[in-house]
Amino acid sequence: MDDDTLKHIYRLAERFRQAIESTDRDTRPIPLILFPHAACGEASVLLGHFLGEQGVENIEYVSGQWGRETHGWLEIEEVIADITADQFIANDEILLSSKYNFDLAPVIVTRHRLWHSQFENQRRHPAAINVYDDANQQRILNIYRAIVPHLR
């Protein structure tokens, strides 16, 4: 993936995160009420759907575990797209201990895997809504419809 495509994905991810944040917290669908906290799975699948609608292909949802913490993000070829990694920052300290200094920005689109590689037992599947059963597909689409009006 070339740098222009990487920048394009970053801009799309940034727009999508801003749309979630622009959705009134009191009217956000339940999985996103505490966004970005405890919202990585839903937010990543929703972002994957949005990126797919924008023509981005080969998007995978990846999840892993670090001790008792779990996290989910997207991978597009060799690029990681993560709009919830900053949930692991509290009082300017990274909650996941590491010998490395990480910049867990609100939107991460990068080829650098070091922080994400710390999550073990990684599982992956296509970041597509149609991998879920009918009830979950409808639930996810309803959440998506609540966010879309806030896209700028």
Image (tube, rainbow, N blue to C red):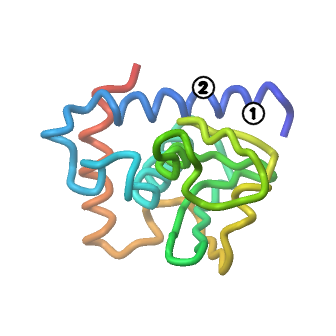
- Mark 2 or 1, nearer chain start: 1
Furthest toward the top, the residue is: 152
Examine the rendering and report whether any part of residue 55 can be seen. Answer: no
| Residue type beneath disc 1 | Leu
In the drawing, does residue 49 fall left or right of residue 22? right
Q: Does residue 8 lie above or below 39 as drawn? A: above
Q: Does residue 96 lie above or below 92 as drawn? A: below
Quadrant of the image containing the C terminus: top left
Residue 3, image quadrant: top right
Secondary structure of residue under mark 2: helix
Asked if marks 2 and 1 touch (Cβ < 8 Å), the reply is: no
Furthest toward the right, the residue is: 2
In front here: 14 or 57? 14
Q: What x and y, as percent, mark residue 104?
A: 62, 42
Q: Give the residue number, with chain letter if any, for mark 1.
A: 6
In the drawing, does residue 1 fall left or right of residue 31? right
